[in-house]
Amino acid sequence: MRLINVETLKLEEFFGDKARPYAILSHTWGDDKEEVSFRDIERGVINKAGNGYIKFERCCTQAKKDGLKYAWIDTCCIDKSNAVELGEAINSMFQWYKEAFICYVYLSDVPPGDKSQDPGSKFFTSRWFRRGWTLQELLAPKQQHFFDQKWSSLGTKLELSSVIQKITGIHRLFLLGSAALHEASVAQRMSWAANRVTKRKEDIAYCLLGIFGVVMPTIYGEGDRAFSRLQQEIMKDTRDDSILAWGLNLGESIPSRSADVISGGVLATTPSDFAKCRHIVSRRQYTRLDNTFEISGGCLRVHLHLHKTSAGEVYGLLNCGPEHNAKQVAGIPLNNAGSGRQSDEYIRPQGYHSVLLPKTPSSISTTTVYIQMERARVAMNRQYWFYIEESDETDLELMDVYPQARWQQDRAMIATANDSDVLEYEVQRSQKLIYMRQEAFGRQSANNGRLNIYATVSKEPVVGQPMFVVRLAPTPSSPEATVDATLELRQLDLKLEFVSILQGEDNIRLETERLDQKINELEKGAQEMCQLAIKRNEIKQRQEKLSERGSEIQRRLDELLKNVSDTKMAPEYWVEAIIKKLLNAGKIDVDLKDMGDFDSDLIHLPKAAEV
């Protein structure tokens, strides 16, 4: 391990456990030309233009402030031209970050004054939280200090843990090291990397080595195989079924499967396949000792409970499920591998998701099943191929194939489940030949007025599968004039135009019906508005009549009682007394319709007796 002496700015090498306390830098790379490299330090040329030297200098300065003599930066402490050293460094990286005295996180895209607690802040959207390598750099260090682009302090990981949990979806117990990483299921740890990216395809696997405690050779150029190797290495040391829970669909409905299925392989292709597995935990207490993974003969052997739906679809129940619902487990879709295979050999069909299903009672025994590892490109039940052999002599071009889904253009082949599918050729233009008369097909020769063509189809077995090779070749003799191809194509043009007209008319009809329905709704709404307005006016008129009648009654009572000496019959007293009685009787909000029509004088006041 090489470390930078922060006083001399030179590299010093340490072996074994003899490394001194050091600070370590976590950052996102800028332009390679700007970064201070191993060769730059070797040559003594470190004061480069750009942000690379600033990171180098500020990291060393901060380390001195923290009383440290050494620092480690990935851009310059590894000789990346040495493949062996690079591989060792990648496998040691997690441990180096874990053993550092402190880790400085430099966020070059977070400006000064940024409010890290604000979901709309630059801190929340920083590129550092989306890079693959920075995941282990977040989890491994015991102490971590975040800095903005001007190297002003943003806070420590402890202080920012709640915010970082929201950004990453990683519980603060794992962020702060209170819980060991292996206590999170494989699916959970994979989900942490689901939205992260790396510059090189292989690195999305290599950046996870330390998180899963895996050591394996790095082979740049292997592409997707790196992630497959990582999963196979994980399986050697775990009985955690959640590694198979990828592709989880949290919806309640289970889609039905077609008869034509393609093997999707038993392993995930990227961490993004685990995007919805954040809350999938391993049920370790129910895991049997013999429930181990074994890979041999291109298959993964695993012990599973098999669940069959009412539609006859099979799911393998894993010993993992949602952390908040112990009655559910994850189930992976399985299809029997087909004829000629063992009854316990399955494929995991491509395009179908894992789902949550009810947990199986412990009394039901598991079944040993073999799931094919390989991700197939062709449906398992497709047994026939048509290969189109093009000829420069004929100057003909394949224009259309029906059904289009069967055409693999990059290999000039048509895959089909049986030999009854129609292979269609057209010389002049691309058309939907399904509208052409059947009598126009089935000819081996043709003539377009200037060229005689003869077609042959030969059956050639390839890798145990029958392949039909279609060849077109010019011939000197004219074919029997049984079909006028020009006439057929003209008829086809007219038929297609007629079909287009019918489709257009149907679309217009549907649009007209939709508009008529909208108009009816608007007219109905207008009528309702008119009726409501009329009713409102009626109510208002009745209110005015009530008000007028109330005023009249009050005036007449006042006249009757103005000369009465009894205070309890004074005008101000009787109004208050009536209101109290109405309140006590609960009739103060009497419905207007119950008040009757006040056009006539309904209240008859007795005349005062003459004295």
Image (spheres, helix red, strand yellow):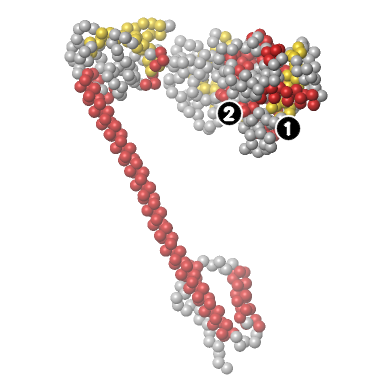
Q: Is residue 375 visible in this depiction of the protein?
A: yes
- Identified at 20% across, 22% down, the residue is 487
Q: Residue type at mark 2?
A: Lys
Q: Position of residue 491 (x, y in %)?
A: 22, 25
Q: Name the outermost residue toward the right.
A: 67
Q: Position of residue 328 (x, y in %)?
A: 60, 29
Chain-order first, disc 1 or disc 2: 1
* Residue labelled with disc 1: 153
Q: Position of residue 543 (x, y in %)?
A: 49, 70
Q: Is residue 523 above or below residue 43?
A: below
Which mark identifies residue 145? none
Q: Is residue 502 above or below residue 541?
A: above
- Identified at 31% across, 40% down, the residue is 509
Q: Is residue 182 visible in this depiction of the protein?
A: no
Query: SS class of the residue under badge 2?
Result: loop
State the quadrant of the C terminus.
bottom right
* Residue labelled with disc 2: 276
In the image, 327: left or right of 401?
right
Q: Is residue 436 above or below residue 599?
A: above
